Image: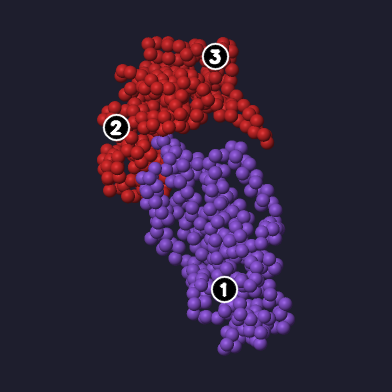
Chain colours: A purple, B red
Amino acid sequence: MLSSSFAQDQAEEISLETLIERPKFMRRFWKATTTKIGVILLSFLILFSFVGPLIYRHSAITSHLLHTLQPPSARFPLGTDSLGHNVLAQMMVGGQSSLEVGFASAFCAMIIGVLYGMTSGIFGGWLDIIMMRIVDVILSIPTIFILLFLNVVFLPNLWIMILILASTSWLGVSRLVRAEVLAIKNQVYVEAANALGASTWRIMVRYMLPNFLGTVLVAATLGIADAILAIAGLSFLGLGLPPPTPNWGGMLSDSMSYMFQNAWWLIYPPGLAILIAEVSINLIGDGLRDAIETRHR
Amino acid sequence: MSEVLLEVKDLKKHFPIRRGFLRRRAGAVRAVDGISLQVMAGETLGVVGESGCGKSTMGRSILRLVEPTSGSLKFQNRDVMAMNKSELRAARREMQIVFQDPYASLNPRYTVAQTLSEPMEIHGLHDSAARRKRVESILDRVGLDPSYSRRFPHEFSGGQRQRIGIARALILNPKLMILDEPVAALDVSVQSQVINLLEDLQQDFNLTYIFVAHDLSVVKHISNRVLVMYLGRMAELASSYDLFSNPLHPYTRALLSAVPVPNPRAKRERIILQGDLPSPANPPSGCVFHTRCPLAQDICTQKVPEWREADANHFVACHLA
């Protein structure tokens, strides 16, 4: 059904720009001070993690065995941990894996959730009932339990970790999408498209998707924060990504043992980084929601 | 008025009522329950009845927008009920619908140009330059400035939106248009403009209308023939003149007596119907109207009145008429 001219039109008309009418959308998005703070903080974290190592060229995994548990000094701006790792360098590299996993798993969750929720909502009937009961069942199991289980069964590398996190976070997205699809399905303009002879595929891509993409985008943004927190939590429990690749959650976990030796430089940096990531992404998510959802409502 | 464009035979649409965990069928709402009629090319058939009598469902069933439960539909001697998906899509070029609510019937995220070129894209007509031209000419034809094509629906008034809805239905050059209360949501002054537009378009494009409405004065003005429906069934069908001057069915009389007359001295008798419309899930026995009919007799509760020609081209379903 997907003729080439249709695909082309689609590329022209369903691009994000027309969806959210870029100039107006950007203005509304940028209006709130909180959004600005969020964008600035997140940009800072991204620059710190990905550009930082290019400027501050120190290995994160070299052990300086003569300098363990050093407080911040000129040589080690954030000190060293019990194995003599440079904490600043570790923070940068750790940020890479935390952010990568967060963004990628939220993206995967969005794709799976949209496809699943749309199928369920459009076809309806028995299929819908079965698909949604599956979601209910998975949601009824505590998330941390599923994550721990999968983490133990599949020894995760970065990619498997992303899929493991996505495996629990698509559920909410699929419910959201299904609800939106059901609401749009009964709109008169969809009936009008039917009367004009539009195919189910066309209605899905051109009527449904643009209408709920905004809502899904907001959910996915907030999902990034959840994923970062989840990977931090798993690492804190000693699972998550295997060493030696550092990540913020793991660093926090390792530093716990030295809390009573007053090794504050091991605790505050990763803790603050996670906090800043959470706050900034949530602020951006809120800003997106405000900008998108005022439209036509 | 010459050939038959659309022939409907014993059209029924029953919506199942499902109950319980296993969604067992517990009954059905008989929204449309046995409609048979012919629509001639070029005429306007008015369909009236109170809310919930199934007139909109009938219109949608004719297009198979809701799948009819049973009955036969012939459009230009082609069997619509036997069409598969792609045949039906092709056939929909020739039969279109204008919806009641101009606010809900346009996609809020499409510009007017997108809304209007969509039908041509679906059917693969014209290249994009020709589509744009066609959009502009059709906008002009329904009385809107072609420069409006870049705007979004929320920038228009109800009347303007309804014109866009009409343009969308018209752009494929259909033969039959189902107008589902096209003016019910509009101001009175705008109503008359849209009605006049519809009449002009009918002339110019040789359209056939099925005009669904509950406003009798509008129906009287625009229709050649009028069908009165009650609880999913046909009560009376006659030419507009005959129906309004000599209504035979007691329900039609009650409806007509409710039309305001612009003369304070005119003596008229108002027939006020008792009670509410019975549930179409559980329609009364015999004549479905007997529960509210001022003339009801024993026979009405027992026997379903047959559909008969009481006068030349004046059909009625009533034992007493």
The answer for which chain carries disc 2 is: B
> Along the line of sight, which residue is nearer the eye, B227 or B90?
B90
Give the SS element for disc 3: loop
Residue A62 picture location, percent across and down:
61, 80
Reading the image, the residue beneath label 2 is B201
Q: Residue at x 32, y 50 (%)?
A: B150
Q: Decide: marks 1, 3 in contact (CB < 8 A)? A: no
Residue sitting at 66 percent across and 73 percent down? A252
Whole-percent x and y of residue A177? 54, 49
Q: Quadrant of residue A87?
A: bottom right
The image shows residue A61 at horizontal and vertical percentages of 61, 77
Numbered tag placed on residue A93 in the rendering: 1
Q: Are discs 2 and 1 less than 8 Å apart at CB?
A: no
Dots 3 and 2 on the same chain: yes
Density class for disc 3 (Cα within 10 Å; few <14, some 14-19, many ≥20) is some
Q: Callout 2, which amino acid?
A: Leu
Q: Amino acid at mark 3?
A: Val
Residue that carries the numbered disc 3 in the rendered image: B304
